[in-house]
Image (cartoon, rainbow, N blue to C red):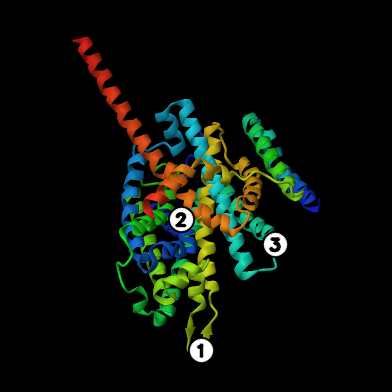
């Protein structure tokens, strides 16, 4: 078995990981998509989305508790048989790797369009990937501890943002409430959970295997998701309250524009980079988890003892993919609005359900076969 | 051209960090996977350096999920 089998993260570290992972890219891409679909009711979609996300956490913990000692990859193999399980796991690894490089693309595009327009995107992607590769090579424990360190920083910046922007809130920007129909609202909710909660299925690689108190981990999963949900609802609501639904939907990065509006007494201005730092923190951890799952998953599929030697070659592939997957921003927007939802649902929704069904089927078969055995002995 | 040389340098650094330990531990399977991944990464990087068109995996995904995504948008719009 893997040499790092004794990796253990504490329940608090797991909560913080779930929190930062769920905030992740959602804070970056979701406000404008939601405002485009649900107009000024985007915040309602976010509230509904958080509710659904808690149900999804229930699903994931049910799957995680099927085999508390196995990761998702091993559970696949256990329940779906050797070849089907391996195929599902390979697709999962592909999903994790592709999405990690998509996050790298987001990061690079954000930096080159907003902060450093003259730097080539390759330079930023390579630098950011280096940090991720370093983190994953050092292992899950190091990632969890750095999350613990970065968490107070994130919270302080977030509270600063909300506090400084609050004088500019105009309630009439979200009126009339419930004006959008039921269909756009459902669509917006689905888009929200597709970024916010469905990717959390990858935590089944960590939960409950690598947590030192597995019985408390489930609660931690709920708390992390709920806290992240509150942060996102606040960000989406304040984008709409300050900028208005129209402006929010037209911006590529509404929360960044939101921070540009901060102006305290004509003195404290132009501090939008605090939002950028929040993103660096959350996207870093999200990307690191995706990449960790991809590398560790591949190592588990091939029954390798160590995943660390694979980190750097996979990092090469990660950077190369990040430069080819989206030729331009329009491509990325269309992909995120159309293909991403079914793609992530395959792994975040269909796969856990399939695993649960297979487990209950297996259990039933075991019960009947043991019945036959006992009848035979009578 | 320059980019490809840079990639070869990076690959060289990766090999010098990882391979000695792998050879010493005698982990054959790990070494094999390492070389395969490194070959894929290097060829992707060099192809990018020479601006060769590489098929985009996200387009395949979009094509696979096209029926579902058009169903969703027709249902919800």
The chain ID associated with circle 2 is A
Kindly identify which residue carries mark 3: A120
Mark 1 touching mark 2, by CB under 8 A?
A: no
Q: Is residue A94 visible?
A: yes
Quadrant that contains the C terminus of chain A: top left
Kindly identify which residue carries mark 1: A266
Left or right: where does residue A347 sit relative to residue B23? left
Q: Residue at point 68% right, 44% down?
A: B54
Pinpoint residue B68: horizontal percent, then vertical percent: 44, 44
Compared with residue A8, is residue A370 higher up or lower down, i.e. above or below? above
Left or right: where does residue B35 sit relative to residue B70? right
Mark 1 on the same chain as mark 3: yes
From the viewer's side, name the closer residue of A184 and B56.
A184
- Numbered circle sitting on residue B36: none
Of callouts 1 and 3, which one flags the residue occurring earlier in the amino acid sequence?
3
- Numbered circle sitting on residue A21: 2
């Amino acid at each position: 078995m893997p040499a790092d089998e004794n990796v253990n993260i504490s329940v608090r570290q797991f909560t913080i990981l779930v929190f930062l992972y769920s905030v992740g890219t959602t804070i970056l891409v979701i406000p404008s998509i939601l405002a485009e679909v649900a107009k000024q009711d985007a915040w309602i979609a976010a509230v509904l989305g958080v509710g659904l996300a808690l149900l999804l956490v229930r699903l994931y913990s049910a799957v995680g508790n099927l085999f508390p000692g196995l990761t998702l990859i091993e559970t696949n193999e256990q329940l779906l048989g050797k070849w089907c399980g391996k195929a599902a796991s390979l697709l999962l690894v592909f999903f994790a790797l592709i999405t990690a490089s998509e996050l790298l693309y987001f990061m690079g595009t954000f930096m080159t369009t907003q902060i450093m327009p003259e730097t080539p995107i390759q330079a930023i992607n390579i630098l950011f990937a280096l940090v991720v590769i370093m983190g994953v090579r050092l292992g899950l424990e190091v990632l969890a501890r750095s999350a613990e360190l970065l968490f107070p920083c994130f919270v302080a910046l977030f509270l600063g943002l909300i506090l400084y922007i609050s004088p500019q809130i105009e309630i009439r920007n979200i009126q009339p409430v419930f004006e959008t129909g039921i269909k756009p609202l459902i669509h917006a909710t689905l888009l929200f959970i597709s970024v916010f909660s469905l990717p959390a299925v990858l935590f089944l690689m960590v939960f409950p295997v690598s947590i030192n108190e597995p019985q408390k981990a489930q609660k931690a999963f709920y708390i992390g998701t709920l806290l992240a949900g509150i942060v996102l609802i606040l960000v989406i609501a304040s984008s709409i309250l300050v900028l208005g639904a129209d402006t929010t939907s037209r911006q590529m990065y509404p929360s960044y524009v939101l921070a540009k509006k901060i102006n305290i007494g004509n003195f404290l201005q132009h501090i939008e980079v605090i939002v950028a730092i929040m993103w660096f923190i959350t996207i870093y951890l999200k990307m690191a988890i995706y990449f960790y799952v991809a590398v560790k998953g591949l190592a588990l599929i091939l029954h390798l003892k160590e995943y660390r030697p694979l980190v750097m070659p996979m990092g090469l592939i990660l950077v190369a993919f990040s430069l080819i997957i989206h030729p331009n921003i329009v491509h990325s927007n269309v992909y995120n609005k159309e293909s991403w939802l079914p793609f992530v649902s395959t792994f975040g929704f269909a796969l856990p359900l399939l695993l649960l069904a297979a487990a209950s089927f297996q259990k039933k078969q075991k019960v009947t076969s043991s019945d036959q055995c006992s009848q035979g002995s009578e | 051209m320059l980019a490809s040389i840079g990639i070869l340098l990076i690959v060289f650094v990766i090999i010098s960090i990882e391979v000695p330990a792998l050879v010493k531990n005698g982990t054959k399977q790990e070494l094999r996977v390492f070389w395969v991944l490194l070959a894929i990464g290097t060829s992707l990087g060099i192809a990018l350096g020479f601006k060769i068109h590489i098929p985009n995996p996200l387009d395949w995904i979009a094509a696979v999920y096209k029926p579902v995504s058009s169903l969703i948008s027709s249902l919800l719009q």
